[in-house]
Image (spheres, rainbow, N blue to C red):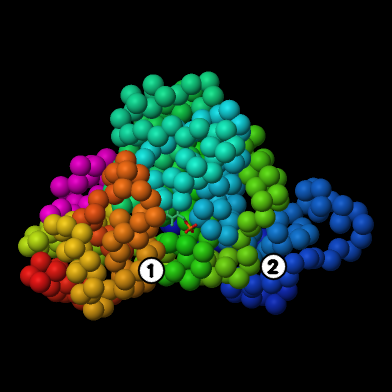
Amino acid sequence: MYNSTKAIHTPFQRRDVYDALQMPVYHTMAYEFDNADVMADAFCGRSDAPDYSRVLNPTVTHFEQRIVNLTGAKEVSAYSSGMAAISAIILSTASAGKNIISSRHLFGNTFLLLTQTLSRFNVEARLTDLTNPENVKKLVDKNTCCIFLESVSNPQTEVADVRQLAKIAHDNGIPLIADTTMIPFTQFDASKVGIDFQVVSTTKYVSGGATSLGGVIIDYGNFPDISKRIKKDSVFNFGAYMTPHVAYMQTIGLETLQVRYDRQASSALYIARLLEKTPGVKKVGYPGLESHPHYQLFKDIYGDKAGAMLTFDLADEAKCFKFINALKMIHRATNLFDNRSLAIHPASTIFGPLSPEQRKTMDIEDTTIRLSIGLEDPEDIYADLAQAIDSAINN
Ligand SMILES: *Cc1c(COP(=O)(O)O)cnc(C)c1O
């Protein structure tokens, strides 16, 4: 079966008592048992019967099962946000005295988690240029517990060769963890390119147009000790399991993921090509453009469709602010892969609280605008961009 079919046809774990077609929202915290024996079995993990909704809920399990079906993973665990999923995989992998190799080009809160939060627990972040595997080889030592990368960094749109990084990780007996939020898991075979644990903010593409916050760890089963900790430590003890109503919305989101992604990615390419020719635009960052430095690498790993996030640069920050203020249809908002198009000036917003030095090390430029292309007609989106750019450079 193809992914677009699987996304819709994944059987329920048990036949629904009313034969509901859509997985119902089991908005219940506890579950009753027929007798003490089955109760003991459920609590001790000898059966898959749910006991308490912080650790197991049928609606959440069904959402997880659909992603298992789509990815061929061994296990999927759903969390209340992308950051909860990232924290859970890192805390299931690292311990005091260990180090993590990653990049300076990271999602803002992931950067702070690795460099600030974890340093209080004596876990060191070794940040380097992951596009150069020699750097990584030099940094790995006996205390390295994982390599962590993002499939396409935001907003730099950098693409590192995950296959080379996986080889280095596996030669050293450690996992490669990839935050692949930018490219849906339906678009490429993560285990084939060597990813051991995929983490995804399902808030973005999966939720179905910014309906809810969520995150998943997609575990390919290559590191059983870490897998055990994901469920036992993170889901049970941290308490950041996805809630049933969110799982319901995100399951519906999964059903339309493929059609939304195809539309948004083709509109993004159309707009990126036009922006390259638009007066006043200094450069465009989109891995689907032939001019992007990682165009071929992106295509080899993630396929033909390069997602719905792109960036472009104007001459200076003042022009970026004028552009943002001149938008008429596109919304001034953060977030990615909403159904509506969004624009933001990352340096003054998402990365605004960081120091200028921190922004510099992360290559966050004052001149960059980030766009998330929605489901509107691409000609309408470009028309709004063109008038706002024109207004910014001529006023
Ligand atoms: C949004 C995002 C996150 C964080 O996800 P939340 O669901 O907001 O917690 C992490 N990584 C990437 C690449 C993201 O885009």
Along the viewing direction, whichever of 13 and 24 lies nearer the viewer = 24
Mark pair 1, 2: CA separation: 33 Å
Q: Which residues are magenta?
A: 282-301
Task: Name the residue type under label 1.
Answer: Asp
Q: Dot 2 corresponds to which residue?
A: 15
Residue 361 left/right relative to 325:
right
Task: Name the residue type under label 2.
Answer: Arg
- Rendering coords of residue 147 (x, y %): 46, 34
Q: Dot 1 corresponds to which residue?
A: 338
Q: Nearer the viewer, mark 1 or mark 2?
A: 1
Q: Residue at x 21, y 55 (%)?
A: 367
- Mark 2 nearby-residue class (10 Å; few <14, some 14–19, many ≥20): few
Q: Please identify the quarter of the rendering in which residue 208 is found.
A: bottom left
Q: Residue at x 38, y 50 (%)?
A: 354
Q: Residue at x 20, y 59 (%)?
A: 317
- Mark 1 nearby-residue class (10 Å; few <14, some 14–19, many ≥20): many
- Rendering coords of residue 391 (x, y %): 12, 73
Q: Which quarter of the rendered picture does the C terminus lie within? A: bottom left
Q: Which mark is residue 304?
A: none
Q: Is residue 56 above or below residue 190?
A: below
Residue 299 left/right relative to 41:
left
Helix, strand or loop at mark 2: loop
- Rendering coords of residue 364 (x, y %): 29, 49
Along the viewing direction, whichever of 387 and 378 lies nearer the viewer = 387
